Structures are given as structure tokens and as C-alpha cells.
């Protein structure tokens, strides 16, 4: 199990940055003072002979002056690093605080949806929510400001908690489940009706085909045995149809 947390690492970086700043600033001021004292003749300057061919130059003063200027520039840039660290710490603290507020609000709003709070006055309702969050096992380590912010947010959204409470949601889900069962039953009835219609149409087609087959057999029998039946006297006499005279239309 690792005991290094983001806060611990950030404190370590801040400590190292502070030590580096103090060290660089001390070296810069000390070296600049030594260089100035050397040019004023109070202290000797750095001796560093540099040889170019046969010519030897004393470059100790230039090297000491350059190092002094470089350290002073670095020391002047270090405060910007402090500002960057301060901004990072502020942003991280803000992110942590917002995540804590969101978690506390989620827990408080869930409890509000379950009718855990009964007080309606703003002061009493917010206090009741703060006490609930403070007793919660997962939120006891949070700061009071975070709990108060989450409680105020929960009180502001109490109407949503009342509208979309657990009881209302359970009632809505029960109603939808009942409607789903009714739809399933209606679907079964439609499937049964469709199956019955298909059976009736199939039976009707079968009866129609059988009637056509019998009618065709009767026609073939009449064609084949019509003369024989007529000769044997099995034919029916044709009925005489007498045309009735039309009634004259009376003249107007």
C-alpha cells in the first residue's frame, strides 16, 4: 500500500522549491556582493588566466561578473515559479472541493428523494441536511463549508426531490409495468386473431377449390352423358317463358 498522496507530493515539491529559491537567492546576493567588493578593491577578484596562443588574459573578473548576473537573473525568475505553484494549488484545491461538494450533494439529494428530511423552513432544513451529511460515514472528513454548500444545494433542489421522489418514481414504474403487461396481452390477442383469420382464409380457399372441382366434374358428366340421359328421359323440360306485353304509358 502506497502512503504517498497528491497532497504529500505537492508539499514535497513546494519544500524543494522553497529550499532552491533560498539557496539561489543567497548565492546570487553573496556572489554579487563579492564581485562588487572586488571591483571596489575591498576584496580580491577571482583569478582565472585564459591563454589564446601566446597571449594570456585575466578573465576571472569577467567570469565572476557573468556568474553574478546569471544567478541574479535566475533569482529574479523564481517568484514566477511560486506564482505558478500557487495557481496549481488553488486549482487543485478548487477541483477537490467541487468533487467533494458534488459527492455530498448526490448523497443528500438521494436522501431527500427518500423523504429523509421533514423540516420545511430554510434555516431548519439546511441545518437538518448538514447534520445528516456530518453523520454520514463517507462524508465525516469533509470541511463544514463543503457540507454547508451541499446542504444549500440540496435545499434549493428540494422541489425536484419532491417531484422525482422514490415513491413517485416507484408509482410511475409500476404504472409503466402494468401498461407493458396490457400491451403484451393485447399483442397476444392480436396474434391469436391473425392466426384464426389465416385458418379461416385457408379453409375458405379449400372449400372454394373443392366446389370448383365438383362443378367441373358435373360439367364433364353433363357433356359426356347428356345425350344418354336425354334418351332415357332424365332431362328436365325447359320452362317456357312468356313475354308479357308492356303497359302503355299514359299520356299527360
Image (tube, helix red, strand yellow):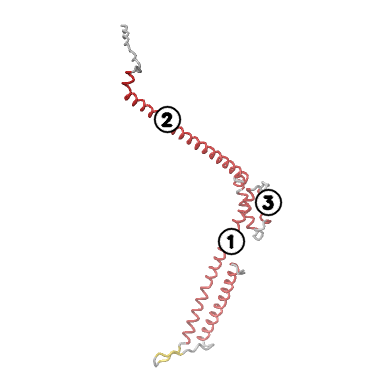
Q: Nearer the viewer, residue 171 or 112?
A: 171
State the SS at label 1: helix
Residue contact at pointers 3 and 2, CB within 8 angstroms: no
Q: Residues within 10 Å of mark 3 (few under 14, many from 20)?
A: some
Q: Is residue 30 left or right of residue 57?
A: right
In the figure, residue 94 lies in which quadrant?
bottom right
Residue 158, percent from left and from top:
62, 47
Q: Residue furthest top?
A: 251
Which mark sits nearer the N-terminus, 3 or 2? 3
Q: Which residue is mark 1?
A: 96
Which mark sits nearer the N-terminus, 2 or 1? 1
State the SS at label 3: helix
Q: Is residue 71 left or right of residue 249?
A: right
Q: Which residue is mark 2?
A: 207
Q: Is residue 208 above or below residue 160?
A: above
Residue 2, percent from left and from top:
61, 69
Residue 80, percent from left and from top:
52, 70
Q: Residues within 10 Å of mark 2 (few under 14, many from 20)?
A: few
Q: Which residue is mark 3?
A: 128
Q: How many marks?
A: 3
Q: CA distance from mark 2 to mark 1?
A: 82 Å
Residue 141, percent from left and from top:
65, 61
Q: CA distance from mark 3 to mark 2?
A: 81 Å
Q: Nearer the viewer, residue 54 or 41?
A: 54
Amino acid at each position: 500500500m502506497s502512503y504517498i498522496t497528491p497532497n504529500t507530493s505537492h508539499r514535497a515539491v513546494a519544500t524543494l522549491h522553497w529550499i532552491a529559491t533560498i539557496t539561489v537567492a543567497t548565492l546570487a546576493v553573496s556572489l554579487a556582493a563579492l564581485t562588487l567588493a572586488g571591483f571596489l578593491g575591498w576584496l580580491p577578484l577571482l583569478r582565472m588566466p585564459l591563454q589564446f596562443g601566446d597571449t594570456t588574459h585575466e578573465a576571472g573578473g569577467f567570469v565572476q561578473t557573468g556568474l553574478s548576473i546569471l544567478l541574479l537573473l535566475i533569482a529574479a525568475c523564481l517568484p514566477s515559479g511560486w506564482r505558478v505553484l500557487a495557481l496549481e494549488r488553488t486549482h487543485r484545491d478548487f477541483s477537490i472541493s467541487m468533487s467533494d461538494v458534488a459527492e455530498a450533494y448526490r448523497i443528500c439529494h438521494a436522501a431527500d428523494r427518500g423523504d429523509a428530511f421533514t423540516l420545511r423552513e430554510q434555516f431548519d432544513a439546511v441545518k437538518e441536511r448538514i447534520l445528516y451529511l456530518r453523520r454520514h460515514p463517507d462524508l465525516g472528513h469533509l470541511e463544514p463549508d463543503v457540507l454547508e454548500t451541499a446542504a444549500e444545494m440540496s435545499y434549493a433542489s428540494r422541489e425536484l426531490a419532491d417531484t422525482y421522489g422514490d415513491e413517485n418514481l416507484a408509482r410511475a414504474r409500476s404504472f409503466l409495468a402494468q401498461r407493458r403487461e396490457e400491451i403484451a396481452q393485447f399483442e397476444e390477442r392480436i396474434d391469436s386473431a391473425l392466426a384464426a383469420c389465416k385458418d379461416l382464409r385457408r379453409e375458405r380457399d379449400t372449400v372454394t377449390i373443392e366446389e370448383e372441382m365438383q362443378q367441373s366434374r358435373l360439367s364433364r358428366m353433363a357433356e359426356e352423358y347428356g345425350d344418354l340421359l336425354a334418351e332415357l328421359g332424365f332431362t328436365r323440360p325447359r320452362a317456357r317463358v312468356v313475354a308479357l306485353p308492356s303497359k302503355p304509358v299514359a299520356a299527360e
